[in-house]
């Protein structure tokens, strides 16, 4: 009889422990990858960054950025999607990994920053916004429903939130350009994006 | 107390608590359990304790007169029969049933298997935690500079053979006149001039990072987002031992881009190889 009572008490204790853990977990900060969805033209937080997408172009070719002359055209078997974005940090000088900034199609395919574009991610400082272009090579059938995923790739060891930004790009009616010229990163004035 | 205690709870049952007698039919159960005030049976003795007949008479071997738990015949070849338990008296209409006294518990034995399981559990948890915290124990303390070294009364701080003092930290405003360049800070930013007097005997270092830190713990790095070729300013901060033919001045001036609303509190100088120690000079 006593053993049955002990088993019953243990079962009740296990249920209560699960309830308490769930309640505590719901009150804590979310941890693991935590996505924040924003729109083109607004600031989105992806700690320790804040990201702002200001323009998106679709083109058959791109022109590599050069300082004093037009760059060489670079064609693609798909289409080029050039995203003009700016970002700043919240604490110190950082540069995001270009491998963690992708265009995600509706069916889950991910298109990374093209290594053939001659541009990659750039430095940014605390509240020091820097704007530049990132070029992606995308399959033509995936252009209509793309989402820019900006993942800081911050390595946090422990139950901490690891936020990333999702910015849907509405490219259903966008005009496909013959060529898009890429711009070098430039520091922005306060309030400018 | 009546002797309604069944024999199963007095001797021979290794799990005396497994069966708790219930009151006979027609007898109401009592309210709170009263403490047992009767004679306490001896704890040590034959298995099962003393039976209803009481303790064994002197000179009689233990267990004699009781049934063998394994059914073995007695020495005389006759299997002893267990004494019949006393029949409970018929319940009286107004008799109150009393819970029988608890049977004597056998002496506790050390369960070595349980001890080994607990030890193995603890060792497993400690080992798992040790392995999983390898990064926190080895790399994380060196991940960034966070332990400022003491600053002497004359404003100098020494770390790994590098002695630094702050000569000047001045806000040049939003439109500074810098020699040899027409560079201007973006709107909403100011340029800061930081001059550090340095002497070093550390031959393993070449340059160190320098940043202005504000009250919100934001780090504004020197020589970043500014013109790198301004006359009179260094494009990096040399903190290693200077070569004999080096033209590094004893006081190095650096240019820093800072938001206009930043409240600068200190200058930090660090190198990854010196983590987690850092030089922090108040402004």
Image (spheres, coloured by chain):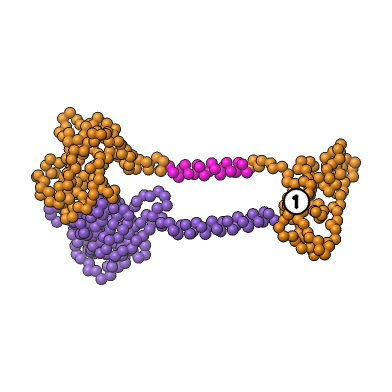
Chain colours: A purple, B orange
Identified at 76% across, 55% down, the residue is: B99
Residue at the extreme bottom of the image, as rendered? A173
**Image height of A185 relative to B203, above or below:** below
The residue indicated by pointer 1 is: B36
- Viewport quadrant of the C terminus of chain A: bottom left
Most common SS among magenta residues:
helix
Identified at 79% across, 52% down, the residue is: B8
The stretch of residues the image draws in magenta is B114-134
Q: Quadrant of residue B152?
A: top left
Q: What percent of the width, then of the height, locates residue A47?
A: 32, 55
Q: Secondary structure at mark 1?
A: loop
The one nearer the camera, B276 or B75, is: B276
Q: Chain of mark 1?
A: B
Dot 1 alpha-carbon crowd within 10 angstroms: few under 14, some 14 to 19, many 20 or more: few
Would residue B11 be found to the left or right of residue B182 on screen? right
- Viewport quadrant of the N terminus of chain A: bottom right
């Amino acid at each position: 009889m006593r053993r049955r009572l002990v088993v019953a008490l243990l079962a009740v204790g296990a249920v209560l422990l699960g309830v308490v853990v769930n309640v505590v977990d719901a009150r804590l900060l979310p941890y693991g990858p935590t996505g924040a969805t924003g729109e083109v033209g607004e600031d989105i937080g992806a700690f320790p960054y804040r990201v702002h997408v200001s323009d998106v172009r679709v083109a058959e070719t791109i022109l590599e950025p050069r300082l004093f002359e037009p760059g060489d055209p670079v064609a693609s078997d798909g289409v080029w999607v050039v995203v003009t974005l700016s970002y700043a940090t919240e604490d110190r000088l950082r540069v995001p990994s270009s491998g963690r900034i992708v265009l995600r199609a509706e069916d889950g395919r991910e298109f990374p920053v093209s290594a053939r574009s001659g541009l990659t991610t750039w430095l940014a400082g605390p509240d020091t916004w820097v704007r530049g272009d990132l070029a992606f090579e995308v399959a033509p059938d995936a252009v209509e429903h793309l989402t820019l995923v900006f993942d800081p790739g911050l390595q946090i060891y422990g139950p901490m939130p690891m936020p990333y930004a999702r910015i849907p790009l509405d490219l259903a009616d966008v005009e496909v350009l013959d060529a898009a010229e890429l711009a070098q990163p430039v520091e922005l004035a306060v309030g400018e994006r | 107390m009546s002797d309604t205690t069944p024999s199963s709870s007095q001797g021979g049952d290794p799990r005396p608590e497994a069966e708790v007698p219930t009151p006979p039919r027609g007898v109401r159960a009592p309210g709170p359990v009263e403490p047992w005030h009767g004679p306490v049976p001896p704890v040590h003795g034959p298995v099962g304790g003393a039976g209803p007949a009481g303790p064994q008479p002197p000179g009689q071997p233990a267990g004699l007169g009781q049934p063998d738990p394994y059914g073995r015949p007695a020495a005389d070849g006759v299997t002893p029969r267990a004494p019949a338990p006393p029949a409970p008296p018929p319940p009286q209409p107004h008799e109150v049933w009393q819970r029988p006294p608890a049977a004597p518990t056998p002496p506790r034995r050390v369960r070595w298997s349980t001890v080994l399981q607990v030890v193995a559990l603890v060792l497993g948890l400690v080992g798992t935690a040790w392995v999983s915290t390898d990064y926190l124990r080895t790399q994380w303390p060196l991940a960034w500079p966070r332990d400022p070294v003491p600053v002497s009364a004359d404003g100098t701080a020494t770390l790994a053979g590098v002695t630094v003092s702050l000569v000047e930290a001045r806000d040049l405003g939003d439109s500074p006149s810098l020699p040899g360049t027409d560079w201007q800070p973006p709107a909403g930013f100011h340029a800061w001039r930081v001059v550090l007097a340095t002497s070093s005997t550390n031959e393993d270092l070449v340059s160190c990072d320098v940043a202005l830190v504000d009250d919100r713990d934001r780090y504004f790095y020197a020589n970043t987002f500014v013109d790198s070729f301004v006359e009179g300013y260094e494009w990096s901060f040399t903190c290693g031992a200077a070569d004999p033919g080096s033209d590094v001045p004893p006081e190095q001036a650096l240019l820093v881009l800072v938001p206009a609303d930043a409240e600068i509190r200190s200058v930090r100088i660090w190198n990854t190889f010196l983590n987690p120690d850092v030089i922090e000079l108040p402004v």
